[in-house]
Structure formats: structure tokens, C-alpha cells
Amino acid sequence: MTDISATPRSSISSSGNALMKKRNLHQKILQGLGIAAISFAALMLFILISSLVSTGSKAFYQTHMQLEVFIDPEQISADNLQRGKFDDVLRDSLQEYFPDVEDRADLRKLESILSSGARFSLRDRVQADPGLIGQTVTVIVPTSDDYDQLAKGMVDRDSPANQRKLSDRQIGWFDTLNEAGVITQPINWALLTNADSRFPELAGLKGALVGSFWALLVCFLISFPLGIGAALYLEEFAPKNKWSDIIEVNINNLAAVPSIVFGLLALAVFLGWFGMPRSAPLVGGMTLALMTMPTIIIATRAALKAVPPSIREAALGVGASKHQVVFGHVLPLAMPGILTGTIIGLAQALGETAPLLLIGMNAFITSAPGSPLDSATALPTQIFIWADSPERGFVSRTSAAILVLLTFLIAMNAIAIYLRSKFERKW
Amino acid sequence: MTTAAFLCLLVLAIAGYVWNRQAASAIRSGGARLHSLENFHGFYSLLMVLVPILVLILLWLVLQGPVVDALLKAGISEHLEGLGTGAVQLIVAEIKSISRGAVFGTPDQWKYDAADRYLTLNSRAEMLLFALVLVLSLALMFVSRRKVDAEFRARHGVERIVSGLMIFCSVVAIFVTIGIIASLMFETFRFFDKVPFTEFLFGTNWEPQIPMREDQVAAKGAFGWLPVMLGTLVITVIAMGIAVPVGLMSAIYLNEFAPKWVRSIAKPFLEILAGVPTVVYGFFAILVVAPAIRTFGQNIGLDVSPNTALAAGGVMGIMLIPFISSFADDALSAVPQSLRDGALGLGATRAEMMTNVLFPAAIPGIVGGILLAVSRAIGETMIVVMAAGLIAKMTINPLDSVTTVTVQIVTLLIGDTSFDNPKTLAAFALGMMLFIVTLVINVFALRIVRKYREAYD
């Protein structure tokens, strides 16, 4: 496009020159506003991502403690492991660093350095190998959330003691342990391998990941065939009449219905009328499928439209039936476009939260679901639950869970873009 | 047992395919000329077995639960006489938990018997399903095998079935709409049985906490939706106040002025912004935006609520920027090149061409996009559930905390599924209003967008 301001200057009078300046200023203002708008959007995206990374990165490592524990046969017997006093055993080994702490209340405070899940992991270990009883083993256990926050520098040591959760003495204990080299900060695999827990230091995403996987699988199995079938019919077979018009308008509107309305539908129909189980990924997947279907239909129709009519005519010309043309030639050629649209639809479904809240997928569940009928959470609802939890540790876990969710979304979109660039043909 | 039924069906369907195909091949090698290819004979059998039996299994699975429950209740009817629906549900739940081996307290003997009966009924139902699947699949297999013949038009049969399936798929979308309307209407009518229609529509008081006991005085329950609607409007206006100028300006800049490299960076940026799940925006609002607004307000001496509408609305505005920008970009691109060339040829600067020619020509498309964004803002849930307030107030002060229709739906329904009190039913009434409002806006907006596109095509 030619630049208008480059017109020869000599032909413009001085008043015209002033006018021209004004008009150019006008253009500069408009451009400036545009740049400001884009910078604003970019800035917001930057703040969003950086605030998530800065809070979330802290949850990817976890403060642990390495203790030499003597598994006292007097406290723990192989016959009755459930009653074994694993907490006492752990406390004894902790006390070796602080021989001067003897008072009962102080001992209890000392014990609270350890996560309350520590005794269970020790119990499981002894259960797996009862031969450990009577021996000294090295255990690495997480510290409780307050000390984890302290180790990560989230506690202001100079603030007045009554404004922190830990007293000066407790901080002193922790420093002693730190100097003794007992404190480690390994990568927090528990974030991915543990299910949810009331204690932030133990809570993980396994249940949510498995729940989301089941829900997405169900969603795919329902919406993919239904979406392709509907799109094929509407694009290739349907006569152009009132009915196909109604269906088309209907699908476009369905794509714009607020997601929470689908939740109400699922609650009233799937749970209320059909009596399906609450909190089940199966119901979640069915609900998401209803929402994903319009997206897949619209993407499939676009992909089918892109296949040139010459292909259809050629196949018809050599004697193929209409069905043979569509299923043998048009559909395979449109498949990359269809898959791209499907993956993008599934990525949207993965991030969808509101309908899952209404069917109860925000329950507190401490084990990963074994089947699509078990109660479970999904990644976005887990984020919602953690965002609502008051413990400090859950703030960074929420951000970490969001980063995990965003990683999945980016991966899915990257696959879709790769498919599009690799297989899509231009005729 | 259900898995076994599915497997049985799958195996028999494939067996039918192979069997028919071989039979057709045999006829052909016998010298006869087949009407359809062998493959179609195979697929005919496959579809004849698969489709009806699959429908049967799915129907069975849907109906088994309610039917078994009804039989269970009929078996213990003498113990259930005179009890309310809630009490009956509790007893049924208790019996089911006993049948799973989770016994709390010391239930009566008849509950143990009922639990046994429940288990037998369920296992019998599953056995029956398996037997039915087996017998019917075999029968259908034989029927389709008998049809294999040189003259048999298997391809036509297959194509008829496939067409039927495709029509079914397209009708599902209609069923979903009907399902939405039916379920919302049903519960909404039940709500208006308990709460007068005019109170809901014109009432200015929203306090859905109804008394749990007869003598409770604190909560009375009031269901006037106006304050809730007002809160939704406040948040929508704030959101549009951010999204419309920013989205439009960035679309104008990207469409006309941006160098190629800026466009190639800014477009993916906006797409990322559009792909972020709303629950993430909600967390962003409570983690960063709300505290920032609050601190700022305190510094200049304003009293800002922790759940200020400004935070929820502002973040929602950020979410809608890419939405509006992409609609406006499309609308601007759809204006024919001749209009641009004409304006430039008459000596307009590019800014004048944009503001005086392109933009007015693209207005209908842009307005359609903005309307769609408004409908999204009204129906958006997670941001407001996390960042907006719970208490309905008749206020338009953006610094105050307001509530929205979607927030109320979620809070009324979380953890409560008994559909017989006005509190839960009110959520459906709100959902109905939400559906109607967004539907009207969407239909209107889609019509504008479509009509406008046709005008230039």
C-alpha cells in the first residue's frame, strides 16, 4: 500500500501543510492507541504467567528431612502394624538432635516439624519389609507445611512473633536441623504421584490427572463419532430444507450456550432422572461431550468444505456410490482438519470447570479413581478446591497445578498445530 | 459382567463380518456374479448385530439402576410407609452402603435382607443382560447370514444403516437443546409452585437461605432476582469497558498498521490469552488483581471490598480481549479491498480510511462480536465464583462486592441434590433466565454477523 504522506510537498500550501500535520498526528494517535492496547494485553499475559511461575515454582520442590530411625521392636510389632507407634519412633530419632527438649508439650511441638503423613510412609515401608523391625533405617520424610514455608523463605523472620505461625524457638530448631544437614529439598514428585490430601505437603494431582483422563476419554469416545456423523450428514447428504436449517442454527447456538447450563442439564437429567453416580468422570465426560460436539461439528464441516469438489466428481465418475465417495475419499482427505479441530475441542474440555462443579467433581477424594464410575476430581476442579483452601502451602500448589494444566493445554495445541502444518493440503 | 456383554457383542459382530464375507466369497468363487462386494456383505452383518444390541445395552444400563431401586423399594414397602421422600432416599442409600460392606451402627435385620436382595437383583440383571446380548446377537448374526445371496443388495443395506446413524448423530444436537429446555423448564415450574412468579421477577431481595427447621427464625428466604441480575450487569459492564476498547484498538492496529512481524507475534499471544481456562483467570483475580486493587484503593483513601466487582469484571475483560479482537479483525478483513483502495485513492490517510470508511463498514460484524462477548460475560462462571461476592446487594458501586447469576447457581447447587426445596430449584430458575437471556443475545448476534457477511460475499 502506498504511503499517502509521501505526496510531493511543493503542491501543498502552508495552510494545507498544517492540516496535513494534523491529519498525520491523528494517524499517529490511532497507531499509538493500537500499540497501547496490544501492549496492555501482552502485559496482562506476562503478569499472569509470571505470577503463576513465581508462586508455582516453589511447589515443584519440597522440604524433606533425612532421619536415622531405629525401628524399636518394643513400639512396633510385626503382628500388629496398624497399632504400631510409628510417630513415637520418629519423634525419638528427632529428639536425638535436641536432647534438652523434654517437656511433653515441647515434644509435641517438636514432632510437628514432621508431616503427619510421615508415620504412614514409614508404616508402609515396614509393612512391605517386616525384616526392618529392630534395625536402623534412613528415612526421608516431608516436613509439615509451616516449616516448608519457612525453608522456602516465605516466613518473615523479623516480623513480631505473634504474627507468625512459628515461634522463635521453633525457627531455632529448624535452623539447628538445617545446620546438621538433615534438611533437603528434592524435586517434589509427590505433586504428581500423590492424590489429594488435607495437608498441603502431601497433596498431589494424581487423582485429578486420572479423573481428567477418564473424563476426556469418555468425552472423546462420545463427541468424536457423534460430531463426525452429524457433520458428514449435514455437509454431504442432507437435503437443503427447513429441517437441516433448524439443525444448523441449533448447533451454532449450542456452541454459544454458557457452560454452566450444560452443568444444570447434567445435574437434572444424568444425576436426577437417570440416577447416575455423583462425582463420576463418566458423567463429567458425558457433559463435556455435549459441549465439545458443536466444536467438532463446526471444525469437521470446515474440513469437509475444504476438500475440492473435483475429488467427489472423479470418484462419482468412475462409478462409486455417494457413500463410497464420502467414506473412501472425502473423509480421509478431511481427517487432518477434523483431528485438529477435535484436539482443540478436547483442550477446551480439559480446562472446563463450571459444569463439573455442578455434578460434584469438586469432592475431597484422597485416592485416584480406578474406573470412570468412581468418584474423582479433574484438574480444573482440583485447582478450584486448592484455590479455596486456606493453608499457605496450597497457594503455591494451586499455581503449580495450573502450570501442569497449561502444560497439557500447550502440548495438545502444539500437536494440533503440528498436524495441521504436516498433513493439511492446499488445493 | 457389563464388560463381558460388551466383549461378547464385539466378538460376535466381528465373527458375523468374517462369516458373511466368507459366504459371499464362496458364492463368487462358485461362479455367480455378486450384486455387492464381499466387504459389504460382511459390514451388513457387523452393523446388523452391532447397532441394535449396542442400543439395547445402553438402554439397559440407563434403566437398570432406577428399575432395581423401584423393585428394592417395593420389597420393603411395609417399612417405608408414611415416610417422606428424603427419609426413603436415606434408607435406600443405607441399604446400598450395607450391600457394599460398609455398615455403620447396628441396622435392623430387614435392612440386611434388603441389602442381600439388592445384590441378587443387580447380579440377576447383569446375568440377564449378558444372556440377552448373547442370544440376540447370535440370532441377528444368523438372520444376516441367511440373507447372503448373489442378488442380495448388501451395499444398499449398509448405506441405509449408515445414513440412519448419521441422521441420528445430527438429531442428537437437537435432543441436547430439547434436554436443556425440558430439564430447566421442569424444575423452574416446580420452583414457581413454591415461589410466586412476580416475586421472583420483580423482587429486590435475594436471600436464598431457607429455614432448615420449623422453628428457625434467622433465615426466611427471599427470591427476588433483581439484585442478582444487577450484579451480573455491573460485572458485565466493567468487563466490556476493558475488553471493547482494548480489543477494538488492537484489532484496528493489527489489521491495518502493524508490521508483519508484530502481527506474527501478537496473534499467537492473543490466542494464548484466549486458550487460558477460566479457572486460571479466577485464580489470577484472587491472587494478583484483587489485592492490587485493594492496596491501590487504600493508598488513595477508598474503601474497597475484598471481593470487589472491579477485580472480577476486570479479569473477565482481559479474558474477552482476544474474543473481541478476533471478531473485529474478521469483520475488518471482510470489507472489500475496493473500499480501501477507493478511500486511499481520494487522498485519505490510512487512519482516516480506517475511522471513516473501514470501521463504519465493519460495524455490524463488530457489534455482533461484542454482543457474543456480552453473552459470554453474562454466562461466565469460574472467574466470578472465585473472585466475586456471595451476597446480593442492590448496588452499582464497582468497588463493592456484588454477586452474579452464575455464582448463585453454583453456590446453591454445590453439595445439595435434593430437588424438593425452593433453594435448589431457585438455581434452575436462574439457569432458565440465564439460558433465555444468552440465547436471545446469541441468536440476534449470529444473525447480524451472518447477514453482514452475506452482504459482501
Image (cartoon, coloured by chain):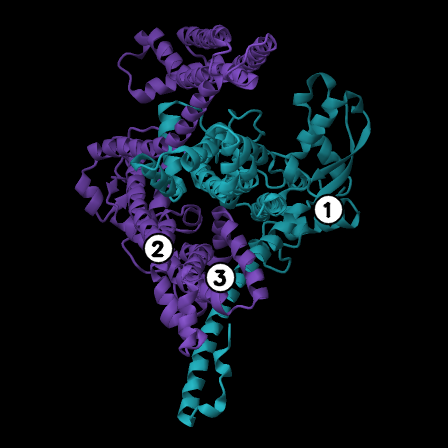
Badge 1 element: loop
The residue to which callout 2 is attached is B368
Coordinates of residue B317 in the picture (x, y in percent) = 42, 57
Disc number lying in front (3 or 2): 2
Task: Tell me how far mark 3 sits from mark 2, CA to CA.
Answer: 33 Å
Coordinates of residue B130 in the picture (x, y in percent) = 50, 9
**Are marks 1 and 3 in one subunit?**
no
* Residue B414 appears in view: no
The residue to which callout 1 is attached is A185
**Residue sitting nearer the eye, A158 or B93:** B93
Mark 2 belongs to which amino acid?
Gly
Compared across the picture, whether B41 is left or right of B72 comes to right
Mark 1 belongs to which amino acid?
Gln
What color is chain B drawn in? Answer: purple
Name the residue located 75 percent from the left edge and 49 percent from the top edge: A178
The residue to which callout 3 is attached is B292
